[in-house]
Image (spheres, rainbow, N blue to C red):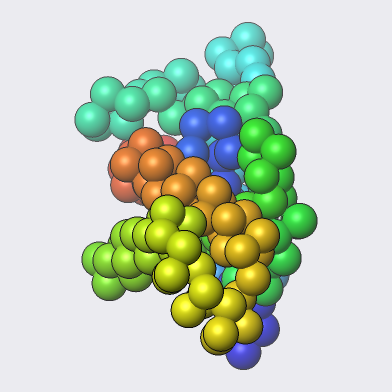
Amino acid sequence: MGQYYYTVNLDKWEFVHPHRLGDGLKAREFSYGPTSTILCALLTTSTGAGGGDWPTKTSPRGELVVGRWANDRIAIVGDYAEPEDVRFDGLPIGDLIFSLCDTDEEVLKHWRYLAGQAEQMKENDHKERRWEEHGYNQARMEGTANRLRMAYDRWGAMKNVSQPCLEWYEMQT
């Protein structure tokens, strides 16, 4: 099977979904197709100054594509990522990012449920003891609650830029 990846902008909370561009999710599958072309355009810092530069057009929906991610923090995060692999505002979120890029409604419901459970556990002593009976200690659950709350809060701000990228890519070909 192997590891699957998303390229994520940690500053804008956007990501590129290789499947929507016709590529696979494995690193070698998207390293030479439309996904790598889109990443080149997103990360380009200067455009229009010379021959062969990307045109500074926007997508049909009016979103800037070329240079949109220039100077941002970008990571290619796999589904095997450990929490410490990626940090955001000091919080280890490496293991959460891949799941957050999945736009499936069932995944979103799962994150809502986990965030709610972690918050309830933190607020209610008797629930904390019940969690400990199942092998979760208070410090671990508080850390998980903080990470889940941050991830859940950011979910609404996270945008999938695959569609504007796809529209832009189709205009170029």
In depth, the one of 42 and 92 nearer the eye is 92
Tell me residue 1's x, y (percent).
62, 89
- What residue sits 64% from the left and 40% below the top? 88
Tell me residue 123's x, y (percent).
42, 54
Q: Where is residue 161, by image quadrant?
A: top left
- What residue sits 64% from the left and 16% below the top? 46
Relative height, residue 24 to residue 89 (above, below) = below
- What residue sits 39% from the left and 42% below the top? 153
Farthest-out residue, top: 49
Farthest-out residue, front: 126
Is residue 36 visible to the viewer in this orientation of the structure?
A: yes
Q: What is the count of numbered marks?
A: 0
- What residue sits 44% from the left and 30% below the top? 65
Relative height, residue 62 to residue 48 (above, below) = below
In depth, the one of 114 and 134 nearer the eye is 134
Q: Where is residue 26, by image quadrant?
A: bottom right
Q: Where is residue 156, by image quadrant?
A: top left
Is residue 95 visible to the viewer in this orientation of the structure?
A: no
In this image, 161 relative to 39: left or right?
Answer: left
Relative height, residue 170 to residue 100 (above, below) = above
Tell me residue 61's x, y (percent).
23, 30
Tell me residue 34's x, y (percent).
51, 54
In depth, the one of 88 and 1 nearer the eye is 88
